[in-house]
Image: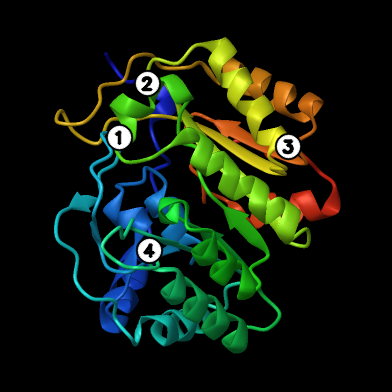
Amino acid sequence: MRKPDFLRAKNILCSEPDLIKRRLRRFGLNTVCEQARCPNIAECFSKHTATFLILGKICTRNCRFCAVHKGVALSPDIDEPEHIAQMAKGLKLRHIVITSVTRDDLADGGAEQFYKTVISVKRALPESSVEVLTPDFQGRIESVARVVEAGPSVYNHNLETVPRLYPEVRAGADYQRSLFILKWVSENAPGIKTKTGIMVGMGETRDEIIGLMKDSIDAGCKIMTIGQYLAPSRRHLPVRRYYEPEEFVELEQIGLEMGFKAVFAGPLVRSSYCAEEIFSREQAGSQILRR
């Protein structure tokens, strides 16, 4: 299908994206912005924001929607937490987002690296907020608890799609397991905002989306993002449908009426896109962030 014009990312003409990339390479760091081929990368890098990708850039799972490389991962870099803290401080970030590849090869799924990174960033930038976007750790609650122990402001774990599509879209993942993680965090760490995100356009129905939103509310989720799925290549899951901007507005309203504290939906919305803004607006009680 031909991509609609409203799905074309902003054309940013400045040197800032290259500057961010040079700094990342100097510290030996990765971002999900680059590895997942995010359409908003130029815009975010021009604003000196990025979502740090820890635990390398090789994922141990083979989700059909994701552009991140799959294969045998390397051992975690012991200097990575401090390097991220140094770069975040150099960029004077007020809200730092930390995510990772899925590391099923590690006994704790990489939870300790999350813990160390959050602690290092908070030490370097005590006035800033930290958001984590974690894998499911294969349902190990002790790993989730270790990340929570570091004290992030936001705990994000994406459901990605509706349960019916999990076998086709998210190999190795489990819908109920992901809901359980969100519910455990919301019940055991009420001071931490829980957040989830999904992509649409992979074959789900409107009723299935609404059902997922209800499940997320029941799990204690406070913030939700909804964006259009864009196939990274012809080898990935094809786009089944492009949603119109008005449909995202409708989903925002449905989510707010259900009880979400903040909903951010739009064609180019991604889970960590404008994360600082949506967190700030949720804190201030302003629920919708238009794009």
The reply to whether discs 4 and 2 touch (Cβ–Cβ < 8 Å) is no
Q: Residue at x 77, y 49 (%)?
A: 282
Where residue 114 appears, as percent x and y from the top left, is: 47, 71
**Residue 10 seen from this side:** yes
Left or right, 276 with respect to 2, comes to right
Q: Residues within 10 Å of mark 4 (few under 14, many from 20)?
A: many
Q: Residue at x 73, y 23 (%)?
A: 253
- The amino acid type of the residue labelled 3 equals Ile
The reply to whether discs 1 and 2 touch (Cβ–Cβ < 8 Å) is yes
Residue ID for mark 4: 109
- The amino acid type of the residue labelled 1 equals Phe
Q: Is residue 1 above or below residue 101?
A: above
The reply to whether discs 1 and 3 touch (Cβ–Cβ < 8 Å) is no
Where residue 156 appears, as percent x and y from the top left, is: 57, 52
Q: Secondary structure at mark 3?
A: loop
Where residue 141 appears, as percent x and y from the top left, is: 54, 59
Counting residues from the start of the chain, the first of labels 4 and 2 encountered is 4
Q: Residue at x 46, y 86 (%)?
A: 86
Residue ID for mark 1: 65
Residue 210 versus residue 123: which sits nearer the camera? 210
The reply to whether discs 4 and 3 touch (Cβ–Cβ < 8 Å) is no
Residue ID for mark 2: 202
* Measured Cα–Cα span from mark 3 to mark 2: 24 Å
